[in-house]
Image (cartoon, rainbow, N blue to C red):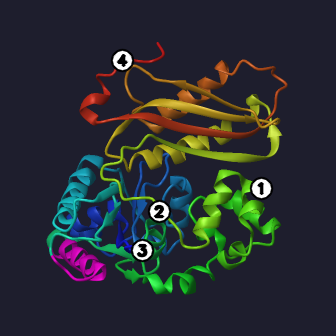
Amino acid sequence: MTVRKIIHIDMDAFYASVEQRDDPQLRGKPVIVAWRGNRSVVCAASYEARQFGVRSAMPAVRAERLCPNAVFLPPDFTRYRAVSRQVREVFLRHTDLIEPLSLDEAYLDVSENKTGLPTATQVARTIREQIRMELHLTASAGVAPNKFLAKIASDWKKPDGLFVIQPEEVDSFLLPLPVGRLPGVGKVMEEKLKGCEVQTVGDLRKMELAALEGRFGRYGVRLYELARGIDNSEVIPDRPTKSISAEDTFERDVPLTKMEPMIRKLAEHTWAASRKESRIARTVVLKLKTSEFRILTRSHTPASPPSSCEELTSIALSLRERVGLNPAQRFRLVGVGLSNFRDPEDASAQPALFA
């Protein structure tokens, strides 16, 4: 079987780096890209700001407390999209198999490349150098035999780093990793795996397929494969985003009337994530899971796409009124999502699904 050569490119602190590049007075200073306000979240933070503990999707008021001397700038997504297109033009010199994940990261399949470079490592090195020389920005890259390993690798030497996982190095790299580094393993899943005495990928590999599938269903099969470095998903050019969401499980089951703080928090995370997309979402979705594990969703498509975090939050909160269950019903999980993504020129022309 032919070994694939996959590169994951991740622009370093992209929005903040564009701001620092375009305004020399910002270089070396802690820059936070965010609207000011109690409900705003951080879109991006320069590495100078990250030294104070500031991170993307953090509430802006908390970021201001952590780094009171930071320069706050409102995001300029028109400019970021234009720079993202320039980065993509660099990618296209090397391969047509490009799968963007957001404005600032993408997978590239360079099993065969346009420039005749002999190795994927040299392709990645060349791409990073071209971005540096032509766009005056830095990018980190991971090179590996599949997508999930390439994504982990690109984060290994950030910022401005290149890390390569050769096929024969997969086990030595993968097995010591904490399971939280695997795609889809969040804090809740990590705790569940700890209950199975699984803390590293090596621990996970010791579990039988039947045990993982019995406990975690289809995702158990995925965990079994990831623990063995298996990821057969292909790089699909221009895969359109179908939805973006954030969800969380309550410590104790709660009624609808007690959900507002969590819905506001999740709406902020979803809004921040959606700002990385070049396309615009038209539909707001509220997801609920009852104490009995029944999943409910309610959605609304306004006449024009949500234009702010406040508008998204307001719609998500209003969707509670359409749940229609006994007021005493309690819920274990809530999620806020955006779906029905369209190109900007098409988004405003679509009729509302729910008048």
Q: Is residue 294 above or below residue 5?
A: above
Q: CA distance from mark 2 to mark 3?
A: 10 Å
Location of mark 3 (residue): 145
The residue that mark 1 highlights is 215
Q: Is residue 292 toward the left or the right of residue 66 in the image?
A: right
- Mark nearest the camera among 4 and 1 is 1
Quadrant where the N terminus is found in the figure: bottom left
Q: Amino acid at mark 2?
A: Asn
Residue 268 rendering spot, x and y as whole percentages: 53, 44
Q: Residue at x 59, y 66 (%)?
A: 225
Instruction: Decide which of tag 2 and tag 4 comes sooner along the chain.
Output: 2
* Secondary structure type for disc 2: loop
**Type of the residue with mark 1:** Arg
Q: Mark on residue 229?
A: none
- Residue 182, percent across and down? 58, 67
The amino acid at mark 4 is: Pro
